[in-house]
Amino acid sequence: GDSVTQMEGPVTLSEEAFLTINCTYTATGYPSLFWYVQYPGEGLQLLLKATKADDKGSNKGFEATYRKETTSFHLEKGSVQVSDSAVYFCALSDHNFNKFYFGSGTKLNVKP
Amino acid sequence: EAQVTQNPRYLITVTGKKLTVTCSQNMNHEYMSWYRQDPGLGLRQIYYSMNVEVTDKGDVPEGYKVSRKEKRNFPLILESPSPNQTSLYFCASSLDLLSDTQYFGPGTRLTVL
């Protein structure tokens, strides 16, 4: 079945550091890929998405590229801020089976 | 304001006492879904609905029921809750599956004693 694997956290960085959170997936078809962010005490919010191979999703300085050859969708940001501290979830949607699959989440702590 | 609402936000109950968690969206979305979030496991899909009267199982449907009698509402029913259903529950909706972007409710923290 489909699945999403992302790096375990927590990840602790200093402000202005470079961020990478790895995400790889297994899917039978051609899924869409997402990064969602969850701030403390809140529901998830879409951060960015990509719907086909080689697409790059971007938002608020975050980027991720849909790499079909490596089945990856790594999240990057060039300079993190304290306000980026949250839990980040990689996810995919399987159009063949009408389902969504989420990774286990990676907690990011950014220190001033 | 476009939103997904869930009630209650917090619930403590006892084993075997039937409960319902309501979910409502005001965006005229066709696709709705329930997830549970557990530490180290991320979100797992319980049930989803493609449209009114169309529901199907996600990855962890055991012990849950849903119904979709109206487009805006998608309640989650636990007929006989057990302690292993203690979790944080999220309802989500999207215009349709192909548009992909899901909008999440604020979550319901359920404790079953």
Image (cartoon, rainbow, N blue to C red):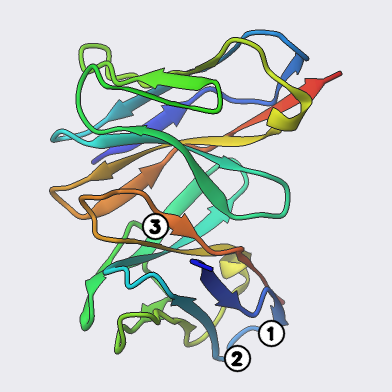
Residue B60 % position (x, y): 38, 61
The C terminus of chain B: image quadrant = bottom right
**Chain bearing mark 2:** B
Between disc 2 and disc 3, the foreground one is: 3
Q: Which mark is residue B14?
A: 1
Mark found first going from the N terminus, 3 or 1: 1
Circles 1 and 2 in contact, beta carbons < 8 Å:
yes
Residue B31 % position (x, y): 29, 65
Residue B79 % position (x, y): 47, 87
Mark found first going from the N terminus, 2 or 3: 2
Q: Is residue A107 above or below residue B19?
A: above
Between disc 3 and disc 1, the foreground one is: 3
Name the quadrant containing residue B82.
bottom right
Q: Which mark is residue B17?
A: 2
Name the quadrant containing residue B17.
bottom right
- Residue A96 vs residue B41: left or right? left
Q: Which residue is mark 3?
A: B45
Mark 3 crowd level (few <14, some 14–19, many ≥20, 10 Å Cα): many
The N terminus of chain B: image quadrant = bottom right
Q: Amino acid at mark 2?
A: Lys
Mark 1 crowd level (few <14, some 14–19, many ≥20, 10 Å Cα): few
Q: CA distance from mark 1 to mark 2?
A: 6 Å
Q: CA distance from mark 3 to mark 1?
A: 24 Å
In the displayed orientation, state which residue is furthest to the right.
A112
Q: Secondary structure at mark 1?
A: loop
**Chain bearing mark 1:** B
